[in-house]
Image: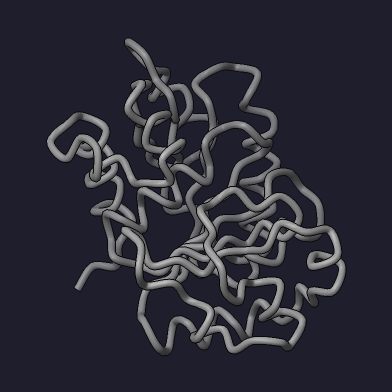
Amino acid sequence: MRLAVTGGKGGVGKSTVAYNLGAATGAVVVDGDLGMADLPATRGPDLHDVLAGRADPVEAVREDGPVRLLPCGRSLAGARAADATELVRAVAAVEHAYGDVILDCPAGMAADAGIPLLVADRSVLVALPDAFALPDALRTRALARELDAGLARVVLNRTGENPPVAAVERALGAPVSTIPEKEVVRRAGRAGQPVQALAPDGPVVDAFESLAAAVAPRS
């Protein structure tokens, strides 16, 4: 499985969904946002180094944290030196070595958002549960279809009571999962941890496990 986690705009919790899906599935999460990386990072080679030909993609995967992760650098110089087209080769190498890969995509519709979708064989679209988010989500769905990254699921993030699941399913033509709005998600993000590390028996972990079961390959 090469699953892209994408969103029509920034701030919808796309990286949070990708990271927690990695925890729920055991997949390697690749931080594919070359310009605005948001996932935890430690010392060592990162995706900028890999895409500039300075590091091997498998050796750049961190296995010492709660989620296996190929992080991305945060420097402008690193982003400029990276050849985004090398992402195809890098993800193939990681998939060969580890199995399932989850790609955290850049937000929006720029070319760098399209490359992780091109690499993926399916996608998850993250949106907020309000009407203003739908136009961006529709454009991102169209891009995913054009690049043959079939839409496996829509994730309505930070939901409260009675999220508009049926309306979003009709608009986007895909099944919807919901992630509830909880303070533990923010605390886990600040700590660089998946939610299961702080609240293993809570409703958010249940929601991510349900999402993982919905998008993981079936034997």
Using the rendered image of the protein, determine whether residue 163 is visible from the camera's viewpoint: yes
For the point 45% across and 66% down, which residue is it? 69
Q: Is residue 108 left or right of residue 159?
A: right
Residue situated furthest top in the rendering: 161
Using the image as rendered, state which of residue 80 and residue 119 is in the foreground: 80
The residue depicted at 51 percent of the width and 88 percent of the height is: 93
Give the image location of residue 138, x and y in percent. Answer: 64, 37
Q: Residue at x 36, y 48 (%)?
A: 20
The x, y position of residue 219, in whole percent, is 19, 73
Instruction: Tell whether 123 sits left or right of 87.
Output: left
138 is higher (above) or lower (below) than 128: below
Where residue 55 appears, as percent x and y from the top left, is 64, 86
User: Can you give x and y, in whole percent of width and height, for residue 15 in the image?
Assistant: 52, 46
Q: Is residue 77 above or below residue 109?
A: below
Q: What colour scheme has been applied to the protein in the rendered image?
A: one colour
Judging depth in this view, the residue of 70 and 155 nearest the camera is 70
Whether residue 1 is visible? no
